[in-house]
Amino acid sequence: MGVGIIKFISLSEAKAFLDDARTLPRYSERANRSCRASVLLSWASLEAAVSYEFKKCNLKHPKPDNLGNRLGALAQAKHVTFDKPAYVQQRKLRNRITHPDDAFVWMCPDVGTATEVFDYCLGLIKQLYSIGEPWY
């Protein structure tokens, strides 16, 4: 039987935005927008993969039910390591975009930071996903 492949549309879009940002002047409005979009879509992909795996593995949601706790429970069920401090660090980047401290100061990750977030989310998806390589 071949390796299953699932296409995560949001992961594909995150990669496309990241690739777009790499071709643009560093602090252009479009580059900033592309980097923010890549970060948010990377996290959306991770959340989709975790939701899918939770249902597939028939796991009960932890208390409190948040992504970090679901990732920890899923990693434990699959006997893989979950680095909670790395998760917290990466999640802070996402939260700075979705919950800005000041409406006039918008967090704009650079291409390197957006790449780091994309790679982090993709790495977790690959580690926890049961069907095979996620295609993006």
Image (tube, rainbow, N blue to C red):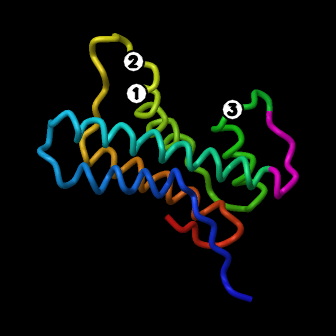
Other residues around mark 1 within 10 Å, as few (<14) / some (14–19) / many (≥20): some
Q: Is residue 36 above or below residue 99?
A: below
Going by the numbered disc 3, the residue's amino acid type is Asn
User: Which residue is under mark 3?
Assistant: 66
Which segment is the magenta one? 55-62
**Circles 1 and 2: CB atoms closer than 8 Å:** yes
Three-letter residue code for mark 1: Ile
Per the image, label 2 sits on a secondary structure element best described as: loop
* SS category of the residue bearing label 1: helix
Give the spatial CA distance, label 1 vs label 3: 18 Å
Mark 2 — residue?
100
Examine the structure image and report whether residue 40 is included in the region drawn in magenta.
no
For mark 1, what is the residue?
Answer: 97
Could you say where residue 6 lies in the image, as x and y percent from the top left? 63, 66
Q: Residue at x 48, y 47 (%)?
A: 42
Please name the predominant secondary structure of the magenta segment in the image: loop
Q: Earlier in the sequence, mark 2 or mark 3?
A: 3
Q: Residue at x 32, y 52 (%)?
A: 18
